[in-house]
Image (spheres, rainbow, N blue to C red):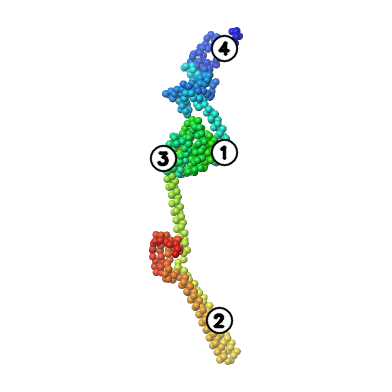
Amino acid sequence: MPADKFPPFPTARPRSDTLPATGATEGGPPMLTVSALNQAVARMLERNFPLIWVKGEISNFTRAASGHWYFNLKDDGAQVRAVMFKGRAQYAGFMPREGDKVEVRTLVTLYAPRGDYQLNVEAIRRSGVGDLYAAFVQLKERLEREGLFDRERKRALPGFPRRIGIVTSPQAAALRDVLTTLRRRAPHVEVVLYPTPVQGEGAAQRIANAIQSASERGECEVLLVCRGGGSIEDLWSFNEEVVARAIVAARMPVISGVGHETDFTIADFAADLRAPTPTAAAELAATAREDWLAELRSHANDLTRSLRRSLTEKTQTVDWLSRRLVNPGAYIQHERVKLAALQTRLAHATRVPLTRMRHRLQQLATHLSHQMPDTAHARRDLLDLTRRLQGAQAARQLRQRQALAGLTTQLELLNPQRTLERGYAIVSDRHGRVLHAPAELAARSEVTIRLAEGSAEVGIASVQPRLD
């Protein structure tokens, strides 16, 4: 293109807040120092490039003694310097290596002393983690819609488990931490290990198989699913659907203790309880021995109070029954009073008819004396009636005496003293309760035997329920 065809070079004036002038030529643009220029470019970059994600390959990685990371981020066509300061690097979760494919969240800035533009990295992750996170969110939302994470499905942990199952790798440091915690807090608890790889190809299915095996065997009361910390790729087996469904289908409560406190997995949402670390999972699962002892003391106190209350109630019942129990002497006296009343009634019943008959005889005698002058015949009749009356009276009195004798005999038969005189005895326990059957006796207990004359305290050597 001919020179006269080029467009004129722009002479736009810079904004005063971007390019601070230190001097100006006559009729020309402002004059800048190198420092002012670099600072202005740095502000322009930071204003026009907010936090962005950049992906590339690590090269020339250096970890300084200060803890800062310095490296280049490159692809097939370009590269850019990057720095990640110690305060950010300590939360990266992994140590980058030469050739790692990474994604960084960064500010674009300019290092003024050298005039190099660079990336000021705030966060770093391995390439593909963004896709993993999207898959994590998608699976979590789908399982949540199915209700797998509903609070109503969560099962309560047993208060005092005697056997705890652990699903993890036998070589995992998390297993050592869990076993140390259980031995310290609850040495009485038995531990059952269901070994499985916790990362790598096929690990998710093997973790699910271990959980299913623990559920089917039914050996433990609570199950820990745990492993130590790591990158999102290291923990990804616990973000697989097959593991989540195995946890939900388990017959016992499941505690997840995967990674560190800031790590969350699908297994955490599916579990009945999520622990921030494997050690915390062991503490949540096992009740401390001191808590066991406190619970036992509480139950012992409750039992003592219950027994005392029951004993008091039974004692009151015995006292009430004792007051209702009739004394044999009082019973005999009561029957004697009844007998005296019967005798009185008998005498009265005998005397009244006799008086009436005598009165009738007098009437007849008077009537006869008026009607029949033959007194001899009347006297004979009177004598005959008198004899008949006396015979009837004697017969009636004999029958009444016989009835009275029968009542007296029955009364004597009811007298317990007569029964005792025939060789029988009354056996009562130390509370005075009369015993009736062998089942109320106990070997080596003491009883009181009342005889016809006096009583004796004896001990029971043995009890024979029936006589052969």
Report which residue position mark 4 lands on.
11
Report which residue position mark 2 lands on.
356
Q: Nearer the viewer, residue 361 or 37?
A: 37
Cα distance in 3D space between marks 4 and 1: 66 Å
Observer able to see residue 347 = no
Q: Nearer the viewer, residue 416 or 157?
A: 157
- Residue at x 49% of width, y 13% of height: 33
Q: Which amino acid type is marked by label 2?
A: Arg
Residue 360, image quadrant:
bottom right
Q: Looking at the image, tell me whether mark 4 or mark 2 is earlier in sequence order.
A: 4
Report which residue position mark 1 lands on.
147
Quarter holding the C terminus?
Answer: bottom left
Report which residue position mark 3 lands on.
184
Position of residue 208 measured from the top left corner of the image (x, y, whole percent): 51, 37
Cα distance in 3D space between marks 4 and 3: 78 Å
Q: Looking at the image, tell me whether mark 1 or mark 3 is earlier in sequence order.
A: 1
Q: Are marks 4 and 2 in contact (CB under 8 Å)?
A: no
